[in-house]
Amino acid sequence: MAALEWQGWLTIGVVLATLGLLLWERIGPHRVLLGAVAVLIGSGVLAPAQALAGFWNRGVLTVAVLFVLVAALRTTGAIRWIGDWVLGRPRGEFLAQARTMAISAPLSAFINNTPIVAMLTSAVEQWSRRSRVPPSKLLMPMNYATVLGGMCTLVGTSTNLIVAGLVLQQPGMRPLDMFDPLAVGAAAALAGMAYLLTVGRWLLPNRVSAVQQASRTGEFAVEMLVEDAGPVAGRSIEEAGLRHLSGSYLVELWRGGVPRFAVAPETVLEAGDRLVFVGVTDAVRELRRVAGLRPATDQLFKLEGDGRRTLVELVLSRYSPAVGHTLVQSSFRSVYNAAVIAVSRHGRRMEGKPGEAQLQAGDTLLVETDPGFPRRHGSSADFLLVNEVDGAPHVDRPRALVSLALVGVMILANTVLGVDILYSALAAAILAVATGCVGVEELRRSVDLRLLLVIACSFALGAAIDRSGVAALVAGYLSGWASADPFWTLVLVYVVAVLFTELLTNNAAAVLMFPIGLSAAGQLGVDPMPFVMAVMMGASAGFMTPIGYQTNLMIYGPGGYRFVDYLRVGGPLSLVVGLAVLWAIPVFWPF
């Protein structure tokens, strides 16, 4: 450590502080990374041009363009259409697992895995309710299969595109082609899916999903009627004191036999209105003390099989402004025009008043809202998953075929004609807009600027690690621990990349480990490509924690999973995949 100048020490401090703040999850990742970049620029560790170079990196630009194609596939229902067709009516749990993995892995090799998991989660949940197979038996294998499939090509995951963009910046290194990761990725995918269909399937938990837990909310619902001559009639909800109750939360109002959701506080109550509150079990005591309200003798609030409600399942992302706040503090009801019925966390429904829960990334919310909510917020960065419960799948078959054809042509142009992936993706995106596969409004919502900001800012940390000497120092330590043996140094680089992925994000892990891998190859005097592959694969192998990979969080609530489930199933999977990757790299990319 004595060899480091002050710039190196400061870089280490910035990286550790960034890691701590990301794990704390009280500040959005984009704000954390922007703060890190500001420190690096202000201290002089990096010049502004060096710190901001990630914003025009070809990998980042390609990820941005691919958002348009993802929006086209999501808007037209192309992925949901394929998922419903492939899933069909499998006979038994094993066949259902095999079929979901068989479709998700190949799809994710050519389409970003986030929309695949979102669309297939909805299909799996509906199939699970029909077949009475717990979704926890299907969602985790499906999710892991998408991660494994994404390792096989450059466009399968943003991580591979980011690494490819970093390679382009290195003088003397040839650009990566579409299928350069295929040999190593296929070895990992085949080994991983073999484990998931054998040993792994016996380790899967039998959990109740967030929606199934919320379906029991009727046990905690209280229905009150506004009396004809009572003091409540003719007053607004706010004036009647029903907005800030200590034990319950108003979710809907019935008037004339029609339910109203996300009722505004200024709504004036009328005699005969039926108010539905959800909260603690003894909330009726508090409500009985409100003059002008009396308990309803008949129960109308039943979630299952009630087509009069639009129920939507949401999973909060790390970018959601509601994270770190309660529903009341974030004005969730008014911002999204949705009333929260239940909140699920760590596989359990949170008891008590939903409005008092301090929300976290990965929380699953069951909300009652209007039918247009999925269209408005389906591509929002605030949510990892927006799934209409029991909603009819929207599939525009002609446009779905066009969007799938555009993706196919993009892949052929890149592989057969040798067109640069950025240009082929840009052409496909322009055609998607021109053919009406994605509208201007969907286009605006589909580009996740905060995610692009996180990726671009991560490049500044990687550049600081490289230029300050930290990368060379860490690479020297890794090489020393491996006795200067290229293979064992490769093993250490892969293991550290996996650890960074589990603690940070896949893209940040790739950017941070890339200069360390190159420095290790340079010190050993070997070809850097094996280390590039190790970083690429290790940065995608986030199986052991919900935060290791974005799609892990997407299935957290819908599957009713707990943190320990990822360790129990994902731990052995990470070992199996690691062995396959470390066997395949020296075979297909010799030192």
Image: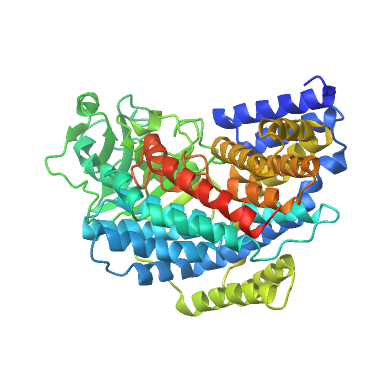
In this orientation, which residue lies closer to the viewer: 221 or 35? 35
Question: Among all residues in the image, which is located at the extreme top?
Answer: 2
Q: Residue at x 40, y 67 (%)?
A: 83
238 or 321: nearer the viewer? 321
Q: Which residue occupies 21% across, 43% down?
A: 272
**Residue 346 locus on image (x, y percent):** 37, 35
Q: Residue furthest bottom?
A: 398
Give the colour scheme of this rendering: rainbow
User: Horizontally, is 167 left or right of 576 in the view?
Assistant: right
Give percent across and percent down for residue 448: 62, 52
- Residue name at image x 22 percent, y 56 percent: 305
> In the picture provided, is 431 more to the left or to the right than 8?
left
Up-down relation of residue 517 to residue 99 (above or below): above
Q: Residue at x 47, y 70 (%)?
A: 78
Number of numbered callouts drawn: 0
Residue 156 in sight here: no
Position of the N terminus by quadrant: top right
Q: Is residue 556 above or below residue 238?
A: below
The answer, for residue 404, to whether it is visible in the render is yes
- The image shows residue 533 at horizontal and vertical percentages of 65, 52
- Which quadrant would residue 283 be assigned to in this image? top left
Q: Nearer the viewer, residue 18 or 513?
A: 513
* Up/down of 210 relative to 192, above or below: above
Horizontally, residue 281 falls left or right of residue 165, namely: left
What is the x, y in percent for residue 262?
39, 45
